[in-house]
Amino acid sequence: MQYITYGGAKYKERRVINIKDLEELTSKITNIKSKGWIKAVNNHTSGIGLTLEHELGVNSGDFEIPDYGQIELKTKKINSEPYTTLFNATPDSYLFEIKRIQEEYGYPHSKNPNFKVFNVSFDGSNYKSIGNKFLFILNVDWNKKIVILKVFDKYSKRLIDDKISWSFELLKEKLYRKLKYLMFIKAKRKYEFPYVYYKYTQAQFYILRSFDDFLKAIEQGNIRVTFKINAILNGKNKGKMHDHGTSFEIKETDLDKIFIKSITI
């Protein structure tokens, strides 16, 4: 079995990728592109990724490992929202941190103001204002080896909370397990009643740089963190928290901050 070895002193470790995985995937994507418009497996937003997986003959049921051998697949509709999720990671500073965030910093649900939600994105280059009380910003603490969501009083600018954090250990494990190698595939979408169709037009293969590059991208505001903390509005669990996950996200135009661009298909 053949492998490509990649790395060196600049990247602090050497990594290998199975050539067979890359060659097979490249061949399959080239074939999928040649098909033109493909009927989606469903009409939902998930259809773009699930349809590609169906065409590739893979089932990425395990969200903690790459989709195709060592290679993670990311799909994006052309002219869609610019951010792509890298991975999900709940703060590991406190077992019930998400619940605490909802209770202390959540704002009223638009459909029921008695329930609190917290659907907000933060980065490391700009303070984000929530309501009339708080300012938030991401901070990389290299000494403590944590990424912190710092909370300040909006008027006095006094730091009031620096407990919400992700350990370097957690983030590195997430990044290296899932995203050492990335195939980023773009597609066009059309709707012909009652079906959706996708045309996969371009694929770019990327190799992860280093964990330090990832942290620097957070510092510089190239990577943001999005909380999706909602509340259940109906049924027996009415009023209870519904956490849709906390995601680390990046724009396609900033992928080269943490990845090296390699093969274009």
Image (spheres, rainbow, N blue to C red):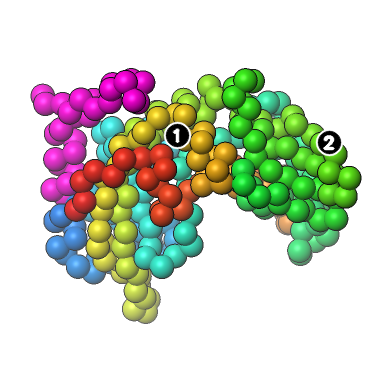
**Magenta includes 94?**
no
**In the rendered structure, which amino acid carries the disc numbered 1?**
Asp
- Extent of the magenta region: 1-28
**Front residue of this view, candidates 119 and 255:** 255
Residue at position x 15%, y 33% in the image: 19
Going by the picture, which residue comes out furthest to the left?
1
Q: Which residue is mark 1?
A: 213
Q: Where 177 sits versus 242, above or below?
A: above
Q: Which residue is mark 2?
A: 160
For residue 230, side relative to residue 73 (left or right): right
The x and y percentages for residue 71 are 29, 37
Secondary structure type for disc 1: helix
**Front residue of this view, candidates 235 and 207:** 207
Q: Where 143 sits versus 261, above or below?
A: above
Residue at position x 64%, y 36% in the image: 139
The x and y percentages for residue 207 are 30, 37
Residue at position x 36%, y 54% in the image: 75
The x and y percentages for residue 136 are 73, 45
Q: Tell me how far mark 1 sits from mark 2, CA to CA.
A: 29 Å
**Front residue of this view, candidates 4 and 197:** 4
Q: Quadrant of residue 140?
A: top right
For residue 80, side relative to residue 11 (left or right): right
Residue at position x 80%, y 42% in the image: 152
